[in-house]
Image (tube, rainbow, N blue to C red):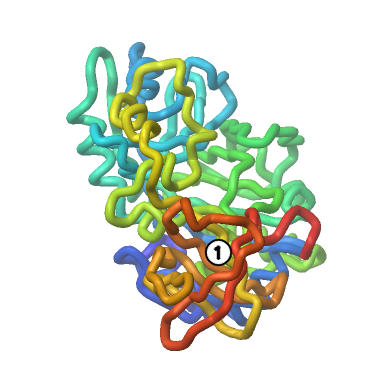
Amino acid sequence: MRTALYDLHKELGAVFTNFMGYEMPLYYKSIQEEHLNVRHSVGIFDVSHMGKIFIRGKDVEEFLSRITVENAEKIKEGMGQYTLLLDENGNIIDDEVFLNLGREYLIIPNAGMHEKIAEWMEKNAEGDVEIEDVSNEYSILAIQGKLSDEVLKEILNIDLNLKFFGCMDVSGNNFKMDFEGRCIISRTGYTGERGYEMYVTPAENAVGIFKKLLEKGGKYGIMPVGIGARDTLRLEKGFMLACNEFKGGRNPIEAGLEWCIDWEHNFIGKNALLEFKKREEYEKLTFLKCIEPGIPRQDDVVMKNGKNIGKVTSGNFSPCIKKGIALAYINKKYINFGENLIIKGRREIKAEIVKGPFVKKGEC
C-alpha cells in the first residue's frame, strides 16, 4: 500500500521501506541527519499509515471509557489523550490517541491495526454509538521540533495556542494558501519534541500542504523525515512501538504504563489487571544503555551472570548520546538501576540499567 504522498516522496529522493504493509520513506538524506534536525529545529513526516476512526453518538463517552483505560468524561472538548485498549485478559491490543472534537471523537490506531480495532469496537459497541473507519480518506502530517510553531504560522493565519494534546478543526479560511476539505490539528507527536499533527481530507490535499510547509519552512531549516528517524526519535524518549513492545501480549503493568490507567472507572480488562498486580514476580520493560560499542536489536537476549533474564524489544543507535540503547522485558527481580547486564545478539554488548528516557528535554 502507498499513502497519497508517495509520488512526492519519490520526487524528494526518498529511500523506501515496507512498514506494516505500506511503502514508507525510510530516509531522504540520512536517518541521523533527519533525527538531529528534528531535535534542533524542525522536520515534517508523512504518517498517513496510521489509522483514523471517528466515533459519534450520545453514548460515545461511556463507550470510550469502557473500551479504554481512560475515563473519557474527564477529557474536555478540544483536548486529546493517550490511552490503551485491552482485551479481557488485560493485555494491550493497541495504544491509541483519541481527540475530543465535540460532536465526535477521532481515534488514531497504530499502522495496520485500524480494521482490527474497528471490528473490535463494533463487537463491543452498546447504545447509541456510530463507528466510522476513515483510514483511507485522511492523510496525517507530523510537524515536529522546537520551530514547529514558526513553520505553521507561515501557512496559517490563526494562533493555534494549543495546550499539549489540544486539538481543533482548521477551516480553509484559516490557511494562507488554497485549501479545500477538512483539517484537524492536534499538538501531539511521537518524537518527544514540541510538535503538531495535521489530519487532512481528502487525503491527496495533504500533498499541497507538505510542499508549502517545505517551501515556507526553508528559512527555519525544515526537512522531510522518514520513519527511520521517527523510530530513533521515539526510542530515545522511551516511547513504545506497538508491534515491538506489545508483541505476544503484554499488559500495562509489564509495559510500565500503569500511569495512564484511570482505576476509578470500569473498563475491559480491569479485573484481570487487578489480579496481575498481586503477583510478586513478572517481567517489566526496562531501559538499557550500552557502555561499550554495539547496537542492540529486537529479540537480542539479555543475560546476567550467564543466565537468560529477558529479551530486547527495541534497540538502535542513539544519534544524541552516541551509544546503543534498548528497551527490554526483564524479570523485575534483576532490575536494579546502575547494574550492568549483557545484551547478546551477533555479539555480546555490556549495558547498564538506567531510568528513562535516554535523552531528556534539551539534552541533545
The kind of residue on which mark 1 rests is Arg
- Residue 294: image quadrant is bottom right
Q: Residue furthest front?
A: 305
On screen, residue 361 above or below 252: below
Asked whether 298 or 209 is in front, the reply is 298
- Residue 232: image quadrant is bottom right
Q: For the point 26% across and 38% down, which residue is it?
A: 118
- Residue 52: image quadrant is top left
Residue under pointer 1: 230
Crowdedness of circle 1 by 10 Å Cα count: few (<14), some, many (20+)? many
Image location (x, y in percent) of residue 234: 57, 59
On screen, residue 59 above or below 250: above
On screen, residue 325 above or below 210: below
| Quarter that holds the N terminus | bottom left
Q: For the point 29% across and 30% down, which residue is it?
A: 272
Q: For the point 28% across and 55% down, which residue is it?
A: 248
Q: For the point 47% across and 34% down, which residue is it?
A: 98
Q: Residue furthest left?
A: 123
Image location (x, y in percent) of residue 341: 54, 71
Image location (x, y in percent) of residue 333: 47, 52
Asked whether 107 or 150 is in front, the reply is 107
Residue 195 lies left or right of residue 138; in this view the side is: right
Residue 335 lies left or right of residue 117; in this view the side is: right
Asked whether 245 or 81 is in front, the reply is 245
The answer to whether residue 225 of the structure is visible from this angle is no
The answer to whether residue 328 of the structure is visible from this angle is yes
Report helix, strand or loop for mark 1: helix
Image location (x, y in percent) of residue 128: 27, 14
| Quarter that holds the C terminus | bottom right
